[in-house]
Image (cartoon, rainbow, N blue to C red):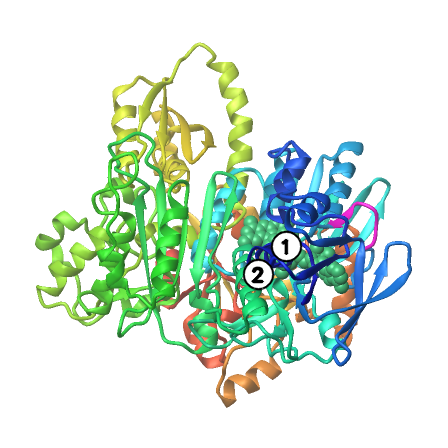
Amino acid sequence: MKYLIIGGVAGGATAAARIRRIDESCEILLLEKGKYISYANCGLPYYIGNVITDRDKLFVQTPASFGSRFNVDVRVENEVMSINKDNKEVTIKRNDGSIYVESYDKLLLSPGAYPVRPPLKGIDSEGIFTLRNVSDTDRIKNYLSTKPIKKAVVVGAGFIGLEMAENLHETGAEVTIVEMGNQVMAPIDFSMASHVHQHLLQKGVNLELQQSVEKFEKKGNQVNVILNNGKVIEADIVILSIGVRPETALAQSAGIKIGEAGGIWVDEFLETSVKDIYAVGDAIEFPHPLTGKPWLNYLANPANRQGRIVADNIVFGNKVKYEGAIGTSIAKVFDMTVASTGLSAKKLKQLGIDYRSSFTHSNSHAGYYPNALPISIKIIFDPKEGKILGAQIVGYDGVDKRIDQIALIIKKNGTIYDLIELEHAYAPPYSSAKDPIAIAGYVASNIVSGIVKIASWRELRDVNRADSIILDVRTEAECSMGMIHGAINIPVDSLRERMNELPKNKTIYIYCAVGLRGYLAYKILALNGFTDIKNVSGGYKTYSTAMAPVSEVKKQIIELEHEDIEQTNKLESSKPVIIDACGLQCPGPIIRLKTAIDEIKDGERIEIHSTDAGFARDAQAWCDNTGNLLISSVVNKGVYEILVEKNPKSCETINSCQNKGKTFVVFSDDLDKALASMVLAHGAAATGEKVTMFFTFWGLNVIKKINKPKVKKDIFGRMFSMMLPSSSLKLHLSKMSMLGIGDKMMRHIMKKNNIQSLESLRDQALAMGVEFIACQMSMDVMGVAREELLDDVTIGGVATYMERATKADVNLFI
Ligand SMILES: Cc1cc2nc3c(=O)[nH]c(=O)nc-3n(C[C@H](O)[C@H](O)[C@H](O)COP(=O)(O)OP(=O)(O)OC[C@H]3O[C@@H](n4cnc5c(N)ncnc54)[C@H](O)[C@@H]3O)c2cc1C
């Protein structure tokens, strides 16, 4: 028998080795177009970032060692150009251009996937790279070592893009990630990705979300990356990590069936539509075990497993069935670990599959044992039976073992009840008696059994505030660090005495820090006759992380670093009191901070250490409210070290402007008026006052997304959509629009004179904390859906606006 294998890395090399282990007499020919076989693609970003220093360690085997150990005829730099399935032959091109033909009895395709390179102007400029193999790695490494690299741009925020961003950052470069979607890591949901956004920003990585690259321009030694909003980012190196596509050209030209998802179609034995030709790895599609629909997986584990299964089927005949992969993946993003398995909520929504999800925030191990770190878990499950459909975990420690446990349960068709039944090995350094997974199971089981009704952070964001009550059951100290707009505060411990303050004819959305006290409050109200109540899943932590503007933290850190230097010079001699609040969940760290500040003198400092990822933001808010000075904020392996100086004298100023603010009703969608409203909002926000912009009727067009998702609308909604500007880019001037020529001229002149565009002013206003409220009534009337508006917009009614307007000292109608 003669077995011929195309592709010598994950799937191909695994299959070759396995075939030899089960059949000593056959002939095996391994054809690889690159220079290397059996290497660690997954390690390439870490070699670029000098985490792996020895290049040789990337190679599991060399062509020679593999050939001699497994008695395989390995031919590198031999590219298969075509397959003749009738004659069972392939045509091969050597590196020197010569062509020859080889026959086979059985053929295996493991050609992998190729990186996407869109036909953008300037994409072939020097300094722009993709990363797929060792040769790409060598080119990037060589470029980094021969050129001064101060600024790097990574286009695409998938797993590899983020790994590259981290590794380029490690080389000392200032890194900007440009991503077309509204989040990094497309396979996970926005709420979980928002933890990663904050972490990246805290690490000093710039994020340009919802931006696509329009073109590249070579400028001296640099490349200018020009975004669709006109922004220009200078880069010494650009890494394109936009995604990959299955390498199917060879199969397609041989008449092998390509499936619906664009991968090589294979049956359960991994045989293609042509007898005796098999395929594995990134190039194939296979039904997803949860949906039965074709699915592409670009992951090493499935490729390796398939390599082994296919070897058995090639040698012994089709006996071993492949069950499919659910897409279990994990990535390190600086100090954070991000993992997912199964289907995301957004994918289920897209597929029309009913689901519920729950968020829980726990500690990686017992809080009283040192270095417990936060771990956030999202479980997605069937609302009736509780079958687990997916899970995502973000944390700093113990993420890997938990995602693997859930993956196993999903693959065995398990339910949320299995999460509770899992028997965890427990000792304080490793877990808690109730492991975070078990807690996730308990919370999910309460939802399925109907013990508690929950609301997602999105539901709360979009809720009509006039028809509902948002009840914050945290302590006053926690509320002083920030609350959800329009919420009222009744701490859970006072709820029994104060529940008469709550109406029974409105929906009450209850939230606490992470969901537990919210659940207790829910039970108190439910047992006292309140029926229309919901507990916000994941509490304030999930809501505030998902709603946090992606530029805010960075701005804060830059300011802090600057301030830090000044302050450190001024107070060199003062040693801070160190407070260890690691392992404590909110409000623990802030209570510790307050107690410690109360005990020191003016001008003295506290350095508080916390593992609560939201603490840096909370501490800033607490300092803003109390007048103390936040000197610096550093995150080190998941531990936030916050330096605060006691400075009560500025409290007076803070209190005196508590009721000030500016509100703008943006009614018009004229480009010039929209610009004027944004400029005014900027000016007001710069004075440190609270600014609210209420977008109503035509004004809604000002806050429409540029890349809007498709939304289902009724006939009137569709008619309005046709008549209204589809995004802010389509707005006209109130005068001299001249069928759009004037609008273009205006934008051109603004760009030429370095005046920010409406879109960039809009983003910056949000980043400065300006509150955008979209009028619910206008949205209903004009058929505008929530998804069409910018993500940071809050939906509200006139009551919400009036509440802000009453407190403000300037209210404008534009
Ligand atoms: C930088 C990077 C990091 C990654 N990190 C991870 C990770 O952390 N975790 C994870 O699960 N996955 C990761 N992956 C993905 C993982 O490497 C792939 O899923 C896996 O390698 C796919 O195996 P494969 O055999 O299908 O393709 P590959 O391993 O890509 O091998 C395909 C080979 O076929 C060769 N070939 C193609 N066409 C021909 C032809 N006509 N003739 C001869 N040879 C041909 C190619 O040159 C290539 O060497 C990473 C990938 C990259 C590039």
Give the structural element (helix, strand or loop) at label 1.
Answer: helix
Mark 1 residue CB less than 8 A from any atom of ligand 1: yes
**Residue 65 vs residue 476: left or right?**
right
Could you tell me residue 252's position as x and y percent?
72, 76
Q: CA distance from mark 2 to mark 1?
A: 8 Å
Mark 2 neighbour class, 10 Å CA radius: few under 14, some 14 to 19, many 20 or more = many
Q: Amino acid at mark 2?
A: Gly
Callout 2–callout 1 Cβ contact below 8 Å = yes
Task: Point out the stretch of residues depicted in magenta.
Answer: 123-129
Q: Who is closer to the viewer here, 558 or 673? A: 558
User: Residue 278 in the image: x percent, y percent?
Assistant: 62, 71
* Res 760 seen here: no
Residue 13 numbered mark, or none = 1
- Which label belongs to residue 591? none
Residue 714 seen by the camera: yes
Q: Residue at x 54, y 60 (%)?
A: 308
| Mark earlier in primary sequence (2, 1) | 1
Above or below for 715 versus 684 = below
Query: Is 127 part of what is drawn in magenta?
Result: yes
**Disc 1 marks which amino acid?**
Ala
Q: Nearer the viewer, residue 489 or 656?
A: 489
Furthest residue in direction top, as rendered: 573
Q: Is residue 486 magenta?
A: no
Determine which quarter of the picture holds residue 585.
top left
Task: Assign ligand 1 to one image quadrant.
Answer: bottom right
Residue behind label 2 places its C-beta within 8 angstroms of ligand 1: yes
Q: Is residue 158 above or below residue 247?
A: above
Which residue is at a point 43% across and 59% down the rendered structure image?
A: 341
Secondary structure mainly formed by the magenta segment: loop
Corner quadrant of residue 582: top left
Disc 2 marks which residue? 307
